[in-house]
Image: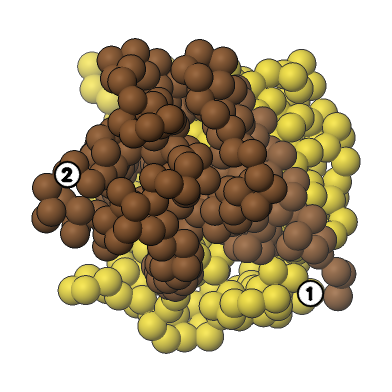
Amino acid sequence: MSKVISVTGLRKSYKDHLAVDGLDLEIEQGEIFALLGPNGAGKTTTVEILEGFRTRDSGDVSVLGFDPSHRGDAGLIWRNRIGIVLQSTLDAGDLTVLESIGHFSRYYSNPKDPHDVIELVGLSEKKGALGRTLSGGQRRRLDVALGIIGNPELIFLDEPTTGFDPEARRAFWELIKNLRNEGATILLTTHYLDEAEALADRVAVINRGKIIEVSTPADLGGRATSLARVTWRDGDVIREEKTSNPTALVQKLSAQFSGEVPELNVRRASLEDIYLEMIGGTHA
Amino acid sequence: MPKTPSALRIGIHRGKIEILQFMRQRESVVFTMLFPLILLAIFGSVFSNSIAKGVTFSQYFVAGMIASGLVNTGFQQLAIMIPVERDFGTLKRLRGTPMPAISYFIGKSILVTVSMVIQVLLLLAAGVAFFGVNLPKSADKWLLLAALLVLGSACSTVLGIAFSTIPKSGRGASAVVSPVVIILQFFSGVFFIFTDLPGWMQQVAAIFPLKWMTQGARSVFLPDSFATREVAGNWETGRTFAIITAWLIVGLIFAIRTFKWERD
């Protein structure tokens, strides 16, 4: 598979603060790749360098075979192939959904049909509504529509579902999966671990300007093979045992209690447990 | 490699979108377009005397307000609007698309031109209808007016774009920009007869383009006999165009070099 994004030894510092410290990253064509990390880890800086918004101090960066720090006509032809969904914006409040999307479609050589995109993001009923009358979730859908109208090969999504209710988030996840199924590669940054777990083919955890692990959500931090924690009530006390064979333990307990084990709980580390451990946070 | 749409075509479409948005912001339409008319009504009623044979204060004032219209629809409008767009993320979003930067400025120029023409027409119509303002009679004067509006508006537009980097935030932009415009209007002989102002005020005003736009507009709307009452004793048309052109060039250089797409 070909690399859509390839980064080696990326470095960027601001005044006295080192934001990105020798970061390496490779993203394959057609995958949804999530970048996880606490605030200040270098996530936004990295993504903005990839998007061509920021310059870098050193390192090699290739996005769709092009160095994003280049400007001029070649830069515009490159931008014609990518779509960027920024964090919350408030612009174009005085244009209708259709006017905004229709206008942005004129920037691209091979745009999608504006009506199709409106349908895809679920704003058909709001086609004629002014931007400023949209709810937070609808506004976000408009942001996505403007990011994908150009039929991009690569989509950057920055914290896409912040402020969504659970139902809107699930609908949004479906939309993102559909875009991937149409062949786009997606780089997602998010705070929500359940979002990364639901969407991403691979996740990278970034901390202090470096990637500390890249893997599938299920395997992150050895999660798939980590010890399971089994707890149950034995008389007045709650007992706990960590085991690599929880099924055998449960069978043994079941025999011991002749049937139902009181308050049985078998739990593997959640993505959140693993993630917090990796970035040196505390367990909730 | 696919060919992206031309910068000019995108720019013209941006112009349409800009005008559409402008017309939908009713408060700003009313403020930008009607406020000068209200001023004309106030000053025209308060100073109803003649300032020279065949020249009413209204005639003098309309010339000044047309020059001010160039500053309001170009400099003031853009220097307030662009910081707001920067705050709202409009500029950053555009930066992330294949839209060429020049298309954004073409769109703004179209917006300024359309609002300037509407402004001038409204002022002329109200002046003629209510304050006995005389329109120029010779083709030469109309030609001079057209040249002044084109050059003045271009100058005002680039200076507005250049100045847009100064306000720190969209919310504060109006507080930074409006006083600059109002003080310049007082110094440049828009509200008062220029030659009645203190000498130092005249000298300060002569550095900036509004004074020259105002003087140029007077050369269109006042009889040539009035020219003897100008500072130099004549209209100084050549110098007027030279100074406005100089500001246009300076503004263009600053606009290109300093434009910011994102907040710091």
Q: Quadrant of residue B120?
A: top right
Task: Please say if the residues under marks 2 and 1 sit with CB atoms less than 8 Å apart.
Answer: no
Residue plotted at (65% across, 52% down): B140
In the rendering, what colour is chain A? yellow
Q: CA distance from mark 2 to mark 1?
A: 76 Å
For residue A58, side relative to residue B18 (left or right) = left
Q: Report the quarter where the C terminus of chain B lies.
A: bottom left
Q: Position of residue A95 (x, y in %)?
A: 65, 28
- Identify the disc placed on residue B197: 2
In the rendering, what colour is chain B? brown
Which residue is tagged 1? A1
Do the dots labelled 2 and 1 sit on one chain? no
**Residue B93 higher or lower than A139, as above or below:** below
Q: Position of residue A273 (x, y in %)?
A: 38, 45
Using the image, name the chain to which the residue with label 2 belongs. B
Q: Position of residue B149 (x, y in %)?
A: 56, 49
Using the image, name the chain to which the residue with label 1 belongs. A
- Mark 2 closeness class: few <14, some 14–19, many ≥20 residues within 10 Å: some
Mark 1, secondary structure of its residue = loop
Amino acid type at circle 2 is Leu
Mark 2, secondary structure of its residue = loop
Q: Quadrant of residue A161?
A: top right
**Residue B66 higher or lower than A36, as above or below:** above
Amino acid type at circle 1 is Met
